[in-house]
Image (tube, helix red, strand yellow):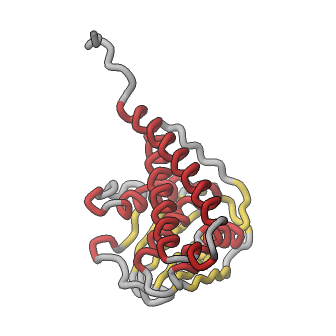
Amino acid sequence: MMNHQDPGPEFSAILASTIHDIKNSLSLMMQNWEQWLAHLPPEQAQAGERGVIEYEALRLNGMLMQMLGLYKLQINELPLQPDWADVEALLQEQLARHAEILQARNISSSCHIAGPELFVLDDTLIGSVIGNVINNSIRYTRSAIRLSATTDDGMLLIRISDDGAGYPEHMLGRRGQDAQAADLVQGSTGLGLYFGQCIAAMHQRDGHQGYIELVNDGELGGGEFRLYLP
């Protein structure tokens, strides 16, 4: 008989544990998927369905990571671990993770660095934000994605641009940590943006705080995600 005096574990903790299990299952599934592909004839292994499956798997993994990250933020267990990072290597690594999907969808990619080669940031957290934006851009771009880094008023500015139709009007503008939380009606895009603005705001230096900004008519003529880090 259930003891109603004992509320048991919080639902958020149960959800976090379940997400961990789902991530492990997804990882095992994709490992077996790669092994299975290796035994297929090339014409079958490169079929269009492969790109769809791998894209959706990356997208699902990204959403799970965001949910875990937001849970850890809520309970103050998502530490910021800033260190000197190679900016170009960080961007190239995220493009490489999506290389097969980009190729399968005939999307060209490029990377241009005009800012500092090294910058102090948490490369794991920032990498997860960039990876999520690339994943979202793959969904909406027409034919190209471009990553770039420069400096703007003493801050590192990372841009992820595409040649799609751009962001909806209501999503445009600057978003800081105090911006409205994710509008879940917008699905994973809203969750990803909220996660990104939280991670950006964790980066602080000399009274300045990181933030994100969404604009249209970017470097490739479509939507452009901008990440500012002090």
- Does 71 appear above or below 210? above
Residue 15 location, x and y as percent? 40, 37
Name the residue rendered at 63%, 74% in the picture: 41
Residue 92 location, x and y as percent? 67, 72
Q: Is 9 displayed left or right of 113 in the figure? A: left
Q: Is residue 152 visible?
A: no
Residue 19 location, x and y as percent? 46, 42
Q: Quadrant of residue 84?
A: bottom right
**Numbered disc total:** 0
Name the residue rendered at 28%, 77% in the picture: 169
Q: Nearer the viewer, residue 69 or 1?
A: 1
Q: Is 131 displayed left or right of 121 in the figure? A: left
Q: Quadrant of residue 222?
A: bottom left
Quarter of the picture containing the C terminus is bottom right
Name the residue rendered at 38%, 35% in the picture: 12
Q: Is 123 displayed left or right of 161 in the figure? A: right
- Does 16 appear above or below 212? above
Residue extending farthest to the bottom is 221
- Does 213 appear above or below 5? below
Q: Nearer the viewer, residue 156 or 75?
A: 75
Q: Is residue 18 visible?
A: yes
Residue 57 location, x and y as percent? 49, 60
Quarter of the picture containing the N terminus is top left
Q: Nearer the viewer, residue 34 or 228?
A: 34
Name the residue rendered at 50%, 40% in the picture: 21
